Amino acid sequence: LGVCAATAAENRWGWWYNNGAPLPEERRINIVAQMLTNGGSAAAAAAYCKCCKNTVYKWWRRWQNTGDVKVLVGKRGPEPVISAPALLYLICISELNRAYSLFAYRERLRQDIGVDASEVRICVALKRAGQLRKKTTIKKIEGQTPHARILRQRYFLTLMANRLTWGVGAINRYVMIDEMYLNFDDTKPSKARAANGHAAEVLDFDSRGKKVGQLAAVSTAGFFAQFVYPCDQRSTTRDLFEWWLVNILMPNLHPGQVVVMDRAKFHDPQRTSSFLAMVGCGLLMLGPYASADNAIEYIHHIEKCYLRRNVPFARLMPMTSLYLVGSMIQPAHCANIMHHVMGF
């Protein structure tokens, strides 16, 4: 890692700065190329850098002063999500090309140094290095992977096969379920716009206080099986979901119906399918992170719009407010959304 020729400024600050100014692109890439030729030492330095830009500076300065990149036992950080040479090269090109997309970074790694890394791994590496400006979530990226696209295609092929088997009225057999979380706490100031002399009132769903959860189902017949509960564990547990499924949802189902649910961690497809088989119903899984294919997500948006109409009451009695807005959902809206989402 230190065999490469460097100027006095580079010896002091590493290959990142030249008397306070970034090095030219050609010089940076030449230095990175020389680092990659050294192999083992470059990999050792990158393996201990914790995938963080500031830590890269620290380990570089430690090597300049001591000539060693060893770390104390038990203080080693997480392993890089991509190879060490690819990580160093990715940090270099991201410093110079902030407008690159994840696909562009992937192509540069493949064409320049022959490393074929997925967009998910590149996103994680850039996030840990503090180089990713756009707030791209891993869920959105994983939802676009080839495997996720195959599962989504399989889902719609199943819908088409069922429609050919059951006829036009097949859409009436589907029931979509999902959970929703709301936060009515005032731990953070709300950001809203209002006329001069009037206080802006808005629900703050992103506070870190106590949350309220809701489990419900939707079909062409309407919105039903609503259950509102205080979310003390920051999420829905498997026991709570299965209790709602057996005691609230299944008594409202008819034999022959198909329940559609997403791939949340607390959803066990085998156990859920066995429970539904007791009442003669089936189970169909959505594709990974395919919230746009779930009709109840649109119902959740309508509920939040209703809650914003009377913010003081919603803050005072959140669980009662959720039950009230659930009773305001029109069956005609549910039928239209089901047709729109399922493409029937």
Image (cartoon, grey):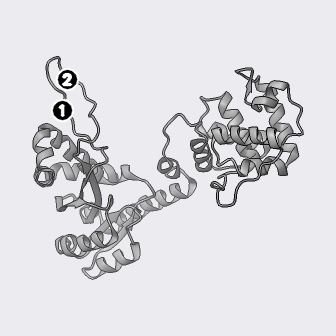
Residue 154 x/y as whole percent:
47, 62
Mark 2 crowd level (few <14, some 14–19, many ≥20, 10 Å Cα): few
Q: Amino acid at mark 1?
A: Glu
Q: Label 2: state its secondary structure.
A: loop
Residue at 37% x, 51% y: name it: 291
Give the number of callouts.
2
Residue 50 x/y as whole percent:
65, 49
With 329 as the anchor, is 11 left or right in this view?
right
> Residue extending furthest top?
196
Q: Earlier in the sequence, mark 1 or mark 2?
A: 2
- Spatial CA distance of label 1 from label 2 is 8 Å
Quadrant where the C terminus is found in the figure:
bottom left
Q: Amino acid at mark 2?
A: Ala
Q: Residue at label 2?
A: 194
Residue 141 x/y as whole percent:
52, 48
Choose between 277 and 208: the one closer to the eye. Answer: 208
With 268 as the anchor, is 112 left or right in this view?
right
State if disc 2 and disc 1 touch (CB < 8 Å). yes
> Residue extending furthest bottom?
278
Residue at 81% x, 48% y: name it: 68
Q: Is residue 115 visible?
A: no
